[in-house]
Image (cartoon, rainbow, N blue to C red):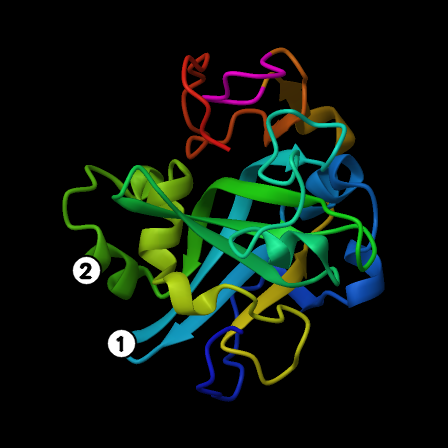
């Protein structure tokens, strides 16, 4: 699974420090969500490389989380969520958009973190070309579908190993985030477990998406 094309990693924005290791991500999704804030996801495609610093994420578990894709068990669609950690889970929603998740927990135990929003920190020209309707740079990756769009993530990135040094999709640790800037609240757009406060964001970041209480099941 995942994109088969391999390119050398490019120099990143100074916000990126080092590529994350698999064992750092093999933790509870709630803890992984907090860890991912401030990290940089960089994607290389044929038309360029874009890096996004994550400012908003949501945690999803498995059998104990009714809002999760894995609540009813493993399927061909959600099997990536069952590990190992450090892979990308990409799914298509509403017949229109792709959403991306970082898999956490241990192999065989489902869990992942939905990437909701971020700031473009490298490849700005490529990002703007992918989302010409964005009214400002703050809106380029504001929301999960916009984030995957500016990064160029598609179905063939499902299962990509984010920890592999030669991968086309790479996850980097960022500069340390002050705990006081991390806020939490209910997840967006879910019909079940609506009030579980597993959405985390960097307070004051203009790229954080607006909260909308869900009426339909999205995950």
Front-most of 122 and 107? 107
What are the residue bounds of the magenta stretch?
Answer: 187-194
Q: Residue at x 76, y 28 (%)?
A: 64
Name the secondary structure under disc 2.
helix
State how far apart marks 1 and 2 are (Cα).
Answer: 10 Å
User: Which SS does the magenta portion mostly show?
Assistant: loop
Left or right, residue 188 beside residue 78: left
Q: Residue at x 61, y 63 (%)?
A: 171
Q: Residue at x 27, y 43 (%)?
A: 95
| Residue 198: x %, y % from top left | 67, 25
In the rendered view, tell whether residue 189 sits above or below residue 202.
above
Q: Which residue is mark 2?
A: 129
Label 1 with label 2: CB-CB less than 8 Å: yes
Front-most of 116 and 11? 116
Question: Which is more N-terminal, label 2 or label 1?
Answer: 1
| Residue 179: x %, y % from top left | 77, 31
Left or right, residue 208 beside residue 128: right
Q: Which residue is mark 1?
A: 47
């Amino acid at each position: 699974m995942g994109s088969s094309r391999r390119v050398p990693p490019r120099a990143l924005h100074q916000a990126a420090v080092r590529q994350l290791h698999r064992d750092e991500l093999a933790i509870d999704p709630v803890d992984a969500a907090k860890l991912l804030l401030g990290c940089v996801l960089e994607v290389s495609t044929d038309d360029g490389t874009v890096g996004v610093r994550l400012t908003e994420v949501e945690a999803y578990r498995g059998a104990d989380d009714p809002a999760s894709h894995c609540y009813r068990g493993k399927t061909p669609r959600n099997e990536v969520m069952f590990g190992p950690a450090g892979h990308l889970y990409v799914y298509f929603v509403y017949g229109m958009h792709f959403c991306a998740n970082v898999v956490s927990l241990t192999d065989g135990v489902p869990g992942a973190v939905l990437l909701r929003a971020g700031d473009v920190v490298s490849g700005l020209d490529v990002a703007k070309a992918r989302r010409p309707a964005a009214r400002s740079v703050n809106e380029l990756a504001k929301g999960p579908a916009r984030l995957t769009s500016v990064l160029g993530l598609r179905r063939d990135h499902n299962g990509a190993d984010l920890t592999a040094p030669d991968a086309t999709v790479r996850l980097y640790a960022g500069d340390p985030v002050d705990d006081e800037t991390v806020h939490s609240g209910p997840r967006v757009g879910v019909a079940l477990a609506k009030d579980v406060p597993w959405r985390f964001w960097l307070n004051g970041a203009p790229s954080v998406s607006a909260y909308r209480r869900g009426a339909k099941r999205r995950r």
